[in-house]
Amino acid sequence: MAADKLGVANMALTMIKAKRITAFPTVADPLDEEATLIFDFYADTLKEVLSEFAWSFAQKRKNPLTLAVIQPTDTIGDFTVLYQVPTDMIKPTAKSKSAALVMFESDGIYSDSSNLGLRYTYLNDTPSTYPGAFTFALAQRLAAAIGFNRTESVSEAKELLVQYRTLSLPAAISADFQKDAQAQVKQDEWENARIAANIWWPL
């Protein structure tokens, strides 16, 4: 399996019969269509796939969250405390206090708790930590994104997107869920929120 971003990129390019690249691009390259497409789509595709599930290899806890430097003077109801959003957060997966009220706004995270913590999916950008099923799903979703932007690969992209949604993503989620179940981790409030539900209910 791919152990780095270049490996993921070339796996995706191979799926649409595109030319492989020799180095992972850090800038767009007008002379290399494949490198430019990887540069354009890799980061956003990774965030999308990470947001699909509370992956065990992409979870962090921050308890308590860091308070915003400037606290709100005009508050709505019980939302009196403002926290900074972790810079690497993709989406929250659990709260440290089940009764705490939480509201996400452009300037941060509002709550009624003065000691709020979150468990969240973070931007894990290290493919060597990904399980094989996730790596394949990521490459397949990336291939679909790139394929829709290559005239000769549109038909393959449509099929890859269907396969991603119906086969590879569910398989990766199932494998990750079973891994957690076999580990028999301590069933504290954080773990119950992840294993039992895997859903963040907006407030």
Image (cartoon, rainbow, N blue to C red):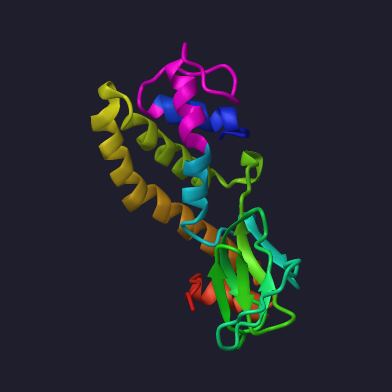
Side (left or right) of 192 relative to 34? right
Q: Residue at x 65, y 40 (%)?
A: 128
- In magenta stretch: residue 59: no
Instruction: Confirm whether residue 196 shows in the render.
Output: yes
Q: Residue at x 48, y 75 (%)?
A: 202
Quarter occupied by the N terminus: top right
Instruction: Say which quarter of the image contains residue 89.
Output: bottom right
- In magenta stretch: residue 25: yes
Residue at the top extreme, as displayed: 31
Q: Nearer the viewer, residue 103 or 16?
A: 103
Q: Which residues are magenta?
A: 15-42
Rendered location of residue 196, percent (x, y) = 52, 76
Magenta portion: prevailing SS class:
loop
Rendered location of residue 170, percent (x, y) = 40, 56
Q: Is residue 184 above or below residue 58?
A: below
Rendered location of residue 95, percent (x, y) = 62, 76
Q: Residue at x 50, y 26 (%)?
A: 10
Instruction: Confirm whether residue 187 shows in the render.
Output: no
Side (left or right) of 144 relative to 103? left
Q: Nearer the viewer, residue 12 or 125?
A: 125
Residue at the front extreme, as displayed: 73
Instruction: Say which quarter of the image contains residue 158.
Output: top left
Q: Nearer the viewer, residue 1 or 169?
A: 169
Q: Residue at x 68, y 64 (%)?
A: 84
Instruction: Say which quarter of the image contains residue 68.
Output: bottom right
Q: Is residue 202 above or below residue 37?
A: below
